[in-house]
Image: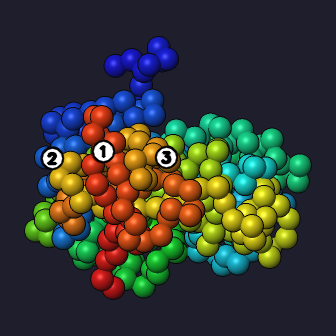
Amino acid sequence: MIAAAGAPLKQTALNSVHRASGAKMVDYCGWDMPVEYSGITREHLSVRTAAGLFDVSHMGEIEVRGPQALALLQHVTSNDVSRLQDGQAQYSALMLPSGSCIDDCVVHRFAPEHYFLCVNAANTDRDYAWMVQCNSFGADVLNVSAQYAQIALQGPRALEILKKLAETDPTDLKYYWFRSARCAGVDGILARTGYTGEDGFEFYFPPTASEQIWNTLLDAGKEQGLIPAGLGARNTLRLEAAYPLYGHELDDQTTLIEANLGWIVKLDKGDFTGRDVLRRQRTEGTPKKLIGFEMTDRAPARDGYPVCIDGKPVGKVTSGSPAPYLKKNIGMAYVPPEYAEVGREIQIEIRGRQANAQIVKLPFYKRSK
């Protein structure tokens, strides 16, 4: 299997397991990854109603250590890292001077001088290089991605399944908190964050234990309906929950304010990369705004389709797909802010035909607590 640039595709430690199980494999950001096992719709619905198990070992991990670790992270991320306690995590972004981001990420605090970032697979090397470039503070920045595999157990029955295998009851682990834990006889890091709109856990551990963890979890969750899930279902699940995906809703030409991520922009923490642009946009407005829409015509919108208002192109679909749980065709797109009000009729150009849609409030799906 050869990547587009001629380099061999990277593989997670579970690659042979995925192939033996009959998974459909694709080139995802230079990684040979499972897009589906038993069908995207089945896997999506399993996560919404029971549980699904994802191999997300392609994600990157970056550690920041030392007396100046906090100073570097405050400078290069949008959120306020100083608010974190030991064992707490926060959603954030690695900022560019333009107010856009080089990546979104989750920052974990182990201790006042020890932080751990989970970043996107496609951006790991670029994220690391950018953090090193911004590191005038003297913090220790380490790309530790090779040291970790990561498995995500997601769905309303995830806790019930995990309790069978975790040596310490994970019930009291709060949302966006994490801790060192032993699961299925393997030591690692257990976090409760997620990217599907459901309750769930991520387990970071040495790659050599990947098959043991994967197979033990699937066996333990069989009675609860746990099945393996691929990147196809991960994408439709995050779209229903209106979570952004880098390269779709987020890129280096789109600011956090435009992307409806103002809630992770903490202007009052002091100076940070891109702060002036974000402060100005918060006061003066933005040239574009992220909206969600539902198709009122039957055809589904797809990524990249033109968005029209009153017959005139105003943007493109950033993410579009059928929503298996909602049983609707949904999508997100950027439009000029004067056209972004909920309820407005818009058109999506599908193979030369303008299909009707309506702007709706985000998220499309929100789980019951």
| SS label for mark 2 | loop
Quadrant housing residue 279: bottom right
Mark found first going from the N terminus, 3 or 1: 3
Q: In the rendered view, does 50 fall on the left or right side of 200?
A: left
Q: Which residue is mark 3?
A: 315
What's the mark number on residue 70?
none
Q: Disc 2 residue type? A: Gly
Q: Which residue is mark 1?
A: 354
Mark found first going from the N terminus, 2 or 3: 2
Within 10 angstroms of label 2, few (less than 14), some, or many (20 or more) residues?
A: some
Note whether 41 is above or below 261 in the view shown: above
Q: Disc 1 residue type? A: Gln
> Which residue sits at x=22%, y=66%?
326
Q: Nearer the viewer, mark 2 or mark 1?
A: 1
Residue 139 showing in the rendered view: yes
Alpha carbons under labels 2 and 3: distance apart: 31 Å
> Which residue sits at x=30%, y=34%?
352
Q: Which residue is mark 2?
A: 39
Within 10 angstroms of label 3, few (less than 14), some, or many (20 or more) residues?
A: some
| SS label for mark 1 | strand
Foreground of the two, 213 or 26: 26
